[in-house]
Image (cartoon, rainbow, N blue to C red):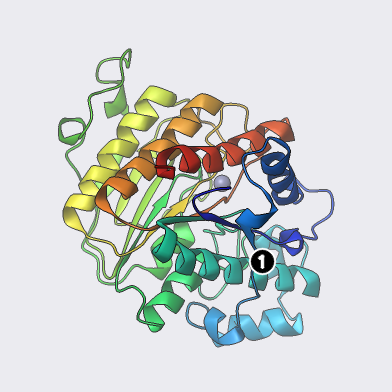
Amino acid sequence: MLPFKLVYSDAYYLPIGDHVFPAEKYRRVRDRLISTGVADANDFLEPQPATDQDILLVHKPEYVNKLKTGTLSPREEMELEVPFSPELVRAFWLAAGGSILAARQCLTDGVCISIGGGFHHAFPDHGEGFCMIHDVAVAIRRLQRDDKVRTAMTVDCDVHQGNGTAAIFAGTRTASALLPSSSTSTVEQPAGAPRGAANQGKMRGAHAGDVFTISLHQHNNYPLYKPPSSIDVDLPDGTGDDDYLAWLDNALSSGLRQFEPDLLCYIAGADPYGEDQLGGLSLTIEGLKKRDELIFRVARARGIPVMVTFAGGYARNIEDTVTIHSNTVVAAKEVFAR
Ligand SMILES: [Zn+2]
């Protein structure tokens, strides 16, 4: 039995047919967690779909109406990059409901993981990059509306920049500026990290409103236009475990020096993996687990509740994607079991 809950439904499955997005990964992660004894049936909570009012806390009425009536233009459907269907709309409403439940539950348990969600490329008025509805933003806005949290921080470790998140929470920002980096780390550079190699990346910062957004991503990758997050870390192609972990540590300490969140939303993309088909970084499965541990350790040490969603993962071998996502649960179990 886990010291926290997992949010999951068989209806998380995205009905998109044969697609680079492995829609069945959610069920496979659930099955893996049970078959390896990491979790049992009692650890899972079944989410309810978000209400339209919840979705409208983030998304424009015109866009929501188009989704509900199936009237996206061909161009809008093309941008979404997944085939539109009413079933797909239901799956995204459920993902948003799952993220609301996970955000609420982590306030009690310290951590909660939704075996789904993380659709960080959805904007208020359109969807793109496989993302129709920004489930994490909906969860934050719903908890703020219910007076459960005042502020939140998103930490987006998907290989693709969190453009939807940045746009939704843009608030009042100043222009981006380079931030001091390696000297501000709270931990030592990982042993064996090539000297100064981390400086090949770039960390940009801008002031935030009530939600502070951090994105670590491959610079030379989708989305072409990257609206400024509170902190963006633009990583060069081929960045490996040690440099990545040093940058993550830097970004987290810098963010938490500037901002005190009531809730941390960790977007735990599996696509910084070296074998990913849509990513160009070189993290290993072990490095990705260390990434998860780092975030959980920081959140736990500071008493910040953390909710987790899975976002992307397109490994050549789907079993690797399942392992990386399952390891996020294992990492949480190790850090929070005490
Ligand atoms: Zn991604």
In the image, taking residue 88 as reference, residue 44 lies left or right, namely left
The residue lying at 49 percent from left, 32 percent from top is: 288
Which one is nearer the viewer's eye here, 209 or 26? 26
Q: Is residue 155 above or below residue 169?
A: above
Q: Please tell me in which quadrant of the rendered image residue 9 appears.
A: bottom right
Crowding at label 1, few (<14), some or many (≥20) Cα neighbours within 10 Å?
some
Identify the amino acid type marked 1: Glu
Circle 1 SS class: loop
Disc 1, ligand 1: is the CB inside 8 Å? no
Q: Please tell me in which quadrant of the rendered image residue 258 appears.
A: bottom left
In the image, taking residue 232 as reference, residue 291 lies left or right, namely right
The residue lying at 37 percent from left, 43 percent from top is: 295
Would residue 261 be seen by someone viewing this image from the given angle? yes
Q: Position of residue 30 (x, y in %)?
A: 70, 48
The residue lying at 57 percent from left, 59 percent from top is: 119
Would residue 277 be seen by someone viewing this image from the given angle? no
Which one is nearer the viewer's eye here, 78 or 33? 33
Q: Position of residue 78 (x, y in %)?
A: 70, 62
Q: Please tell me in which quadrant of the rendered image residue 275 appears.
A: top right
Q: Position of residue 183 (x, y in %)?
A: 15, 31
* Number of numbered discs overlaid on the protein picture: 1
Which quadrant would the C terminus be assigned to in this image? top left
Q: Is residue 10 above or below residue 273?
A: below
In the image, taking residue 243 as reference, residue 188 lies left or right, namely left
Q: Position of residue 324 (x, y in %)?
A: 59, 36
Q: To which residue does mark 1 refer?
A: 46
Q: Is residue 331 above or below residue 50?
A: above
